[in-house]
Image: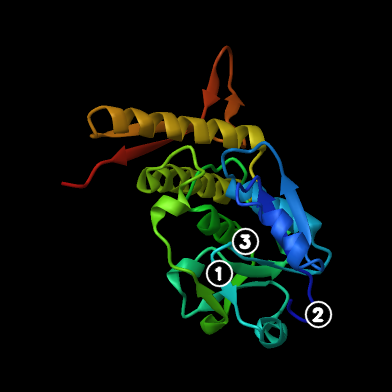
Amino acid sequence: MQPDSECIVVDYDCPDGTADWVQANCPEVKVVRVYDAPRFHKSHAGNLGAAEATAPWLCLIDADIVVDRAFVERLAPLLVSGAYLRPSPLDWNAYGSFVCSRKDFDAVEGYDEVMENSGCMDDDIYRRLEISGVKQKTFPGELFVGIPHDDTIRTQFYEIKDRSFSQTVNAVYANIKHDLLRYASESILPLATRRIIYAEVRAVLLDRLEGPRSGGRIEISLPVGSSVPMHGKWELHRKWIFDLRNVGP
C-alpha cells in the first residue's frame, strides 16, 4: 500500500479469482466485483473503480503496471489544479495509466463506456480533458513500470481479438466525437448521440473489413442545430461527412 492513499481493485469477473486473492492477502484494499461479465469492458471497469474512490485525486492504473513504493510521496508535490499527469519518459505498457483530479474526471464523465474492446479509450479521455481546459503535465516515468505481455493476453476477454481493427474503430469514433465536441463547445456529447456514432463507425468498418477495403463514408448529424426551419415548407439539415480511405498497399 502507498501512504496517504486508498487502493481499489476492480475484479471484472476475473476467472483467476483476483478479488478473493486480494481480500485474503491485502485486506486493507477495497475490492469492486463485477459478476457475469464474460467480456472485459475497460471503460466500465475504470469508471467503477473511480466511483468508489473518496480522495480528491485519482490514479487510474492498468493491471499490468508495477508502481514504485515512493510513487505517492514523489507525486504529491506535482498535483496542481487544472492538470492531469502522465509518466515521462513513457513505458509503452504504461500508456493508459494517468493521474487527474476527481473534479476533472467527473466533469468529462470519466471513460466513455460506448467504446468497446481495446484501444484509444485512454487517448479519448486525455483529449476530452484537454478540450475541457485541463492541461497535460508529467511525473517521473520510472515510478511506473509496465509488465510486458503479448496481445493474446491483452485481448483474451474482448469480443474482437483483432487489436488493430478494434483500435481503428475506436480511433475513428473518437476523432468524430472530438470534432463534434469542438463544434458544440462542449466536453460531453449525449449518450444516445455517441451510441449512434459508434454503431455507424463499426458498421462501416466491418463492411470494409469483410469486403473490398477501398474505404467508406460516415454521415453524422450535428448534435447542435442539426435542423433549421426555413421559409415555407423547407428545412435545412446539417450533416458532417467523414470519408475513410485506405492508403495502405
Pick out the residue farthest to the left. Answer: 249
User: Splitting the image into 4 quarters, where does residue 204 fall?
Assistant: top left
The N terminus sits in image quarter: bottom right
- Sequence order check, earlier mark of 1 and 2: 2
On the image, the x and y values in percent for residue 96 come to 54, 63
On the image, the x and y values in percent for residue 139 come to 58, 81
Residue identifier under label 1: 65
User: Splitting the image into 4 quarters, where does residue 75 fall?
Assistant: bottom right
- Residue in view at x 46 percent, y 80 percent: 89
Indicate which label's residue lies in the foreground, 3 or 2: 2
Q: Is residue 146 above or below residue 205?
A: below
Q: Specify few, some or many for label 2: CA neighbours under 10 Å numbering under 14, 14-19, or 20 or more.
A: few
Of the pair 156 and 218, the residue shown nearer to us? 156
Q: Is residue 52 above or below residue 44?
A: below
- Sequence order check, earlier mark of 3 and 2: 2
Q: CA distance from mark 1 to mark 2?
A: 20 Å
